[in-house]
Amino acid sequence: MSTAFHFGDSARPLYGVFHAAKLRAGGPAVLLCNPFGEEAIRAFRIYRLLAEKLAAEGAPTLRFDYYATGDSSGDCSEASLSGFVEGIREAHQELLDMSGAARSIWIGLRLGGAAAVLAARQSPQGLAGLILWDPIVTGAAYLDELAAGHRAAIESQIGRPPSDALSEAIGFELTDEFRRELAALNLLLGERTARKVIVIAGGDPATDPALRTALTDAGADVDWRADLDEASWNSDKALNSFVVPTRTLELIVETVRLWR
Amino acid sequence: MAVRERIIRFGENGRLVGMLATPGGSFASTAVLFFNAGIVHRVGAHRFNVKLARLLAARGAPSMRFDLSGLGDSAAAPPGQGFEAQAIADIRAAIDAFAAALARPARFAAIGMCSGADNAWRAALADERLAALVLLDPYAYENRRAKLQRMAAKAADPERWGRALGRLGRQDSLGQRPEEADASRPFPARAEFGAGLQSLTRRGVDMLILYTRFVEEQLARPEHFFDTFRDFDFNGRIEVGVDRGVDHTYTELSAQKAVFGRIADWLLGPRS
């Protein structure tokens, strides 16, 4: 059974869906951290399915929208990486309160993976570890990717270059402040993060393998999985179909089930 | 004007999920329902429905965006009904829940994009409470004048052949090529769609129909639409726009701003 609700600061409430479960003794809860923009739209169904599978395996799971995204309050022009990081910390606390779990695993897809790493650097109490799924490693490369994706979308659909390839990304605003935050994002700098990190690196473009070294150097126990040979969830075609990256979801559910 | 939002669960065992957006101040008489586009959840492509719902609420119009059975946060329906029949049943339940939540008389309008427009058309035929429709890229049928003009333009401009070839691989951001959309989106016969529109207008339903570049092979100007349905009388209740400079889901922010303004003005009257 899932429960949709608002939580966090009443002046800027966040939308969340809690998937209740009969918590395994000592078992972790799970927090799902969204990617950004068009990718969040594409990932919605996959996250719902993943949350249902995790709850069925005894892991209470919370999925939520960051401030200024999805059904949460806030205008798209207010979206920011720092806001996403703050949202993860708020949602983590909410999840522990609702589930009764002592700790939670954060699963972050694409920019959600990077935001989870940044939030983990603040050493929140009760963080069990991270599962990073095709994480964004450097914001500069991600900005290039967003610009190329926006240009390709407009050119293929309208037959002309986009009117603005810098401050918007496939239907979503990219303010100067958000761009500055992304430009400064670099997970290779090796700052301390969670003790245990699983990286699922099967996407296109491939996750920079230097992330493994950086996380290890920062003291994390890293399990790097790049061998899933998975159908892409992140495509125009997948958006309007029921494509599900089955092997990745199975790996995540199994990883959470065996989490120690 | 501040906008208030709250979650609403409705339908059998509360298995359907929606979001009510209401104005902080006085209410307009029009209340708006948003339908799913394809299988995208209720926030819409590029958060289209959230942005427009908040704009409408700021101008006094309450709205409800929700997920049909099995989409978004709504649970699947028990087996038994086809998708179209289930969608109509869900929409009826949504109007019931919306009316109860508003607790005031309202003129109900529906906004649907792509398959959401198809559902809006069908739902309005089935439920007389729907009094206004905004249909974004609903069914489109090839028009003889549009075809002649297109052929003439191509003949006069060989470069268009190259561009037409380039479009062969094109997909819209709901993940469909137009012809694939047609395959996965069974079209009623032209006469059936026209007759349905006519019966709605006779009932007093007003419609704003906006087409994009997505249907450029079918029509390029509003008069092509009316020529296609020249054997029907829409009683002056259908306004048609065609913007060939925007894509199926209004990806560019400038396109979103323009269409939001047009829809809000059409539903609520021009901002004074």
Image (cartoon, coloured by chain):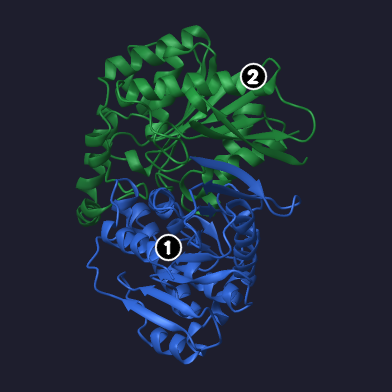
Chain colours: A blue, B green
Question: Residue at the spot x=33%, y=58% of the render?
Answer: A249
| Same chain? Circles 2 and 1 | no
Q: Which residue is mark 1?
A: A150
Identify the amino acid type marked 2: Ala
Provide the chain ID for the residue under circle 2: B
Question: Residue at the spot x=25%, y=63% of the render?
Answer: A230
Q: Which residue is mark 2?
A: B100
Residue A144: quadrant of the picture: bottom left
Q: Are marks 2 and 1 in contact (CB under 8 Å)?
A: no
Q: Residue A36 at what x, y percent from top left?
A: 50, 61
Report if residue A165 is visible in the image. no
Q: Nearer the viewer, residue A17 or A36?
A: A17
Question: Residue at the spot x=46%, y=85% of the render?
Answer: A215
Q: Which mark is residue A200?
A: none
Q: Look at the picture and state if B204 lies above or below A121.
A: above
Relative placement, left or right, of B27 versus A260 is right
Q: Residue A132 at what x, y percent from top left?
A: 43, 71
Identify the amino acid type marked 1: His
Residue B30: quadrant of the picture: top right
Q: Look at the picture and state if B180 lies above or below B100.
A: below
SS at circle 1: helix
Q: How many marks?
A: 2
Q: Residue B132 at what x, y percent from top left?
A: 54, 20
